[in-house]
Amino acid sequence: MPIDQSLVGREFPPTDPYPVTSVKLREFADATGAAYDDKLAPPTFPIVVAFEAMNGFLADVEVDLHRIVHGEQRFAYQRPVRVGDLLTATLTVDSLRQIGGNDILGTTSLVTDVDGALVCTTKATLIHRGEDS
């Protein structure tokens, strides 16, 4: 079943606060092969928080993660992510189009700190595979 067009423009609730620690940075660096710095996060680290926002969105609209193909990811920073940050992400659906029985979703997640200041904007393209794909 195609995803409903009424989702375009909808903002989903923010994620629970995610504490950035040197242990979490080490785990991320080990898992991805990124350079480890015990104070600053690697450039792709906000995906950890943005992925939680995406999972919340998918659960809310009852889309199975196994039907999703991650098409693209971009990051735009206001400042680096640092140890001690407490981050949340809020996802908005920017666009939705159907091609060949698949839904192509454009999303933006705003990653903010405990004071609500924007740290990073992530943009993702997600392909929701249709029943026959």
Image (cartoon, rainbow, N blue to C red):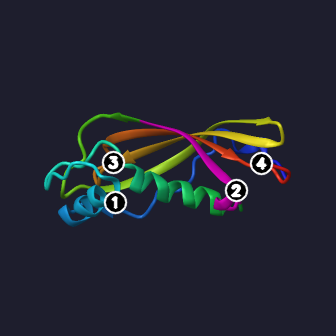
Callout 2: helix, strand or loop? helix
Q: Residues within 10 Å of mark 3 (few under 14, many from 20)?
A: few
Measured Cα–Cα span from mark 4 to mark 3: 31 Å
Taking the image as shown, residue 34 lies to the left or right of residue 130, namely left
Residue that lies at the very extreme toward the front in this rendered image: 33
Q: Amino acid at mark 1?
A: Ala
Callout 4: helix, strand or loop? loop
Q: Residues within 10 Å of mark 2 (few under 14, many from 20)?
A: some
Measured Cα–Cα span from mark 1 to mark 3: 29 Å
Q: Are marks 2 and 4 in contact (CB under 8 Å)?
A: no
The spot of residue 109 in percent (x, y) is 48, 44
| In the image, residue 130 lies in the stretch drawn in magenta | no
> Considering only order in the chain, which callout, 3 or 1, is on the residue closer to the N terminus?
1
Please report the residue visible at 35 percent of the width from the left and 45 percent of the height from the top: 44
> Considering only order in the chain, which callout, 3 or 4, is on the residue closer to the N terminus?
4
Mark 1 or 4, closer to the camera: 1
Q: Amino acid at mark 3?
A: Gly
Task: Write down the residue under mark 3.
Answer: 116
> Considering only order in the chain, which callout, 2 or 1, is on the residue closer to the N terminus?
1
Q: Are marks 1 and 3 in contact (CB under 8 Å)?
A: no
- Residue 67 has which mark? 2
Q: Which residues are magenta?
A: 63-74
> Considering only order in the chain, which callout, 3 or 2, is on the residue closer to the N terminus?
2
Mark 1 or 3, closer to the camera: 1
Looking at the image, which is closer to me, 12 or 24? 24
Q: Are marks 2 and 3 in contact (CB under 8 Å)?
A: no
Task: Write down the residue under mark 4.
Answer: 3
> Considering only order in the chain, which callout, 4 or 1, is on the residue closer to the N terminus?
4
